[in-house]
Amino acid sequence: MSDQEHYLDEIEEEAPRKKKRFRLFDSQREGPGVEKDEEPITPDLRGFFRSFKRNFTKLVRVNLFTLIGNFPVLFALLGISGLFKVEYMTAVSGYFADLRTQLLLGAETSPATMAVVGALGAQIPNSAMTTASYVFLGLSLLTFITFGFVKVGTTYILRSLVRGEPAFMMTDFRYAVKRNRKQGFIFGIIDLFLLLLVPLNMVTLLQSTGTFLNSVFFWANVAIAFFYLLMRPYVYLQMITFDLKLTKIVKNSLLFSLLGFKRNLLALLGVAILYLLTFIFIFGLGGALLPLGVAMFFVIFAAGSYMHAFAAWHKIETIMVAPAEESEDYSTSEAEAE
């Protein structure tokens, strides 16, 4: 019996199967498959919409995996919601405290001075965060632990949907997390850190004084964010498909972001439109479309990831998967001939 036949016998008995270097998972596993009368999905824009429509209900389930898996985000929402803040009154003007101090130290008073004090001393309600608020914000940092695991698991499912293969939600999710837990954990921390840090830098630079150096830093952050969003989907797809070092995966992803620039840019534009529409539905138009915005929230994260996966997988399959499979088939043929 050849090594290839022995390997196939082993993976039939093993559930789920182990990941091998440059070998895709067995597509012969049990499942509903694709009906014979269904037209194959092509890796173009028309094919994307057909694939998206076919897998919509599954994307809703993937979105639930994302929401439930990253539950610590709820702690952040509670921390900034104002439910645990302390309400107090404060002066409208910041000059009131200085003027009031001068009066208490014996400064000369007059009707005009007291009129100014009265105007500046008008009070408005304000609030301050409490210990409970900071505790919830601290608990939200657990997202750095869950983020990578959830992303690895959902990417595995999305890859199956893009390829038109059966997807067993919970089984596939657990399998992907188990097989990629180390890399998923490490890159998940880096990924979330960059997703939070770069936009924060951009907002801070916009609010600061408009100097030439600030403008340079701002546009540098824009460039970093742009290319990182283009390469990011390739990182997770390679992670769940191949047995490569993380540094090699990141290097490959940078190259893929350029090789598939048009597809990646189109996917990024689609995600931006999706998030913009959701924002308008929830916060704009006087709340008239709020129910639609809430409904989109239950698919938005999976839909955005699916756009990126559909655009990225074609390049990975063409450049890395196909040559690896041809090489493996050639080696198997040689072994059988001997």
Image (cartoon, grey):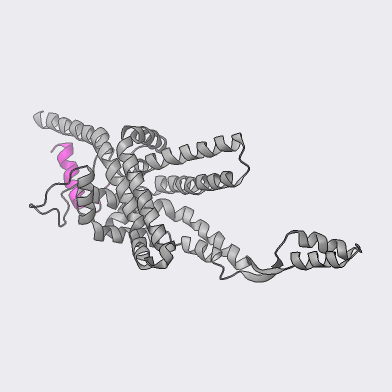
Left or right of 47 on screen, residue 195: right
Q: Position of residue 74 (x, y in %)?
A: 47, 64
Left or right of 10 on screen, residue 291: right
Along the line of sight, the residue nearer the viewer: 53 or 20: 53
Q: Which residue of the protein is positioned furthest toward the front in this rendering?
A: 112
Q: Position of residue 121 (x, y in %)?
A: 75, 67
Relative vertical location of residue 230 with respect to residue 280 in this rendering, above or below = above
Left or right of 118 on screen, residue 50: left
Q: Predominant secondary structure in magenta?
A: helix
Which quarter shows the C terminus? top left
- All told, the count of numbered labels is 0
Q: Is residue 2 part of the magenta span, yes or no? A: yes
The residue lying at 19 percent from left, 49 percent from top is: 164
Is residue 172 in view from this perspective?
yes
Which quarter shows the N terminus? top left
The residue lying at 19 percent from left, 42 percent from top is: 7
Q: Position of residue 176 (x, y in %)?
A: 32, 51
Along the line of sight, the residue nearer the viewer: 23 or 288: 288
Relative vertical location of residue 109 with respect to residue 41 in this rendering, above or below = below
Relative vertical location of residue 258 with respect to residue 12 in this rendering, above or below = above
What residue range appears in magenta? 1-18
Quadrant assignment, res 35: bottom left
Q: Is residue 215 part of the magenta span, yes or no? A: no
Is residue 238 in view from this perspective?
no
Left or right of 256 on screen, residue 141: right
Q: Which residue of the protein is positioned furthest toward the left in this rendering?
A: 37
Along the line of sight, the residue nearer the viewer: 187 or 116: 116
Relative vertical location of residue 100 with respect to residue 19 in this rendering, above or below = below
Q: Position of residue 302 (x, y in %)?
A: 33, 55
